[in-house]
Amino acid sequence: MGAFDFADLQFERGYRRIAAYGRSKLANLLFTYELQRRLGGSGAGTIAVAAHPGTSRTELTRHQSGPMKVMTWVVEHVVGHDARMGALPTLRAAVDPAARGGDYFGPGGLWEMRGHPRRVQSNPLSHDAGLQHRLWVESERLTGVTFPV
């Protein structure tokens, strides 16, 4: 999920937490795929992979209130899984000897919300090479750090 507004990349003209969360998740994927392209083009032996935990019962939603808090609790407890299971896709991405650059791991169960990790597909927008490159360039500009690959 998520969309990009490069004119207000950091929500300086009005913060919306759900939109910011979605943008941050999309940015993680865009950045990972651009990093993989750069690593592969340089001949580096390192790969870049991504992972998502599904719907995990963590402290992420502790400040919600009202109907949203109730809905989140139901989703986390009925469809989701505990934080230990949510950590498994990241663990698999880090140690799976069969992982390839650009792989994306997530829960293999219902709507990728729960279950043991497997390779999954990311949002089609995350595969937009133009967006990947533009985010990379903007990240370098904002941080003042140029990646040497």
Image (tube, helix red, strand yellow):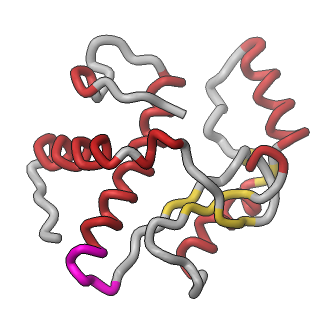
Q: Which quadrant of the figure contains the C terminus?
A: bottom left
Q: Where is residue 104 in the image (x, y as percent from the top left)?
A: 56, 61
Horizontal side of 26 relative to 34 (left or right) equals right
Question: Which percent across, then down, holds residue 40?
Answer: 30, 75
Q: Residue at x 77, y 13 (%)?
A: 67
Quadrant hosting residue 75: top right
- Kindly indicate the quadrant of the structure image that contains residue 99: bottom right
Q: In the rendered image of this protein, does residue 135 appear above or below residue 92?
A: above
Q: In this view, does 38 lie above or below 108?
A: below
Q: Does the magenta-highlighted stretch encompass residue 60?
A: no
Which residue is at a point 72% across and 55% down the rendered structure image? 83
Rendering coords of residue 105 (x, y %): 62, 62
For this view, does 41 lie left or right of residue 59? left
Q: In this view, does 113 lie to the left or right of 103?
A: right
Residue shown at 31%/57% (left/top)? 34
Classify residue 35 as left or right of residue 53.
left
User: Quadrant location of residue 72?
Assistant: top right
Q: Residue furthest right?
A: 78
Q: Which of 130 and 56 is in front in this view?
A: 130
Over which residues does the magenta segment extend? 40-45
Q: How many dots with numbers?
A: 0
Q: Quadrant of the N terminus?
A: top right
Image point (26%, 43%), residue name: 135
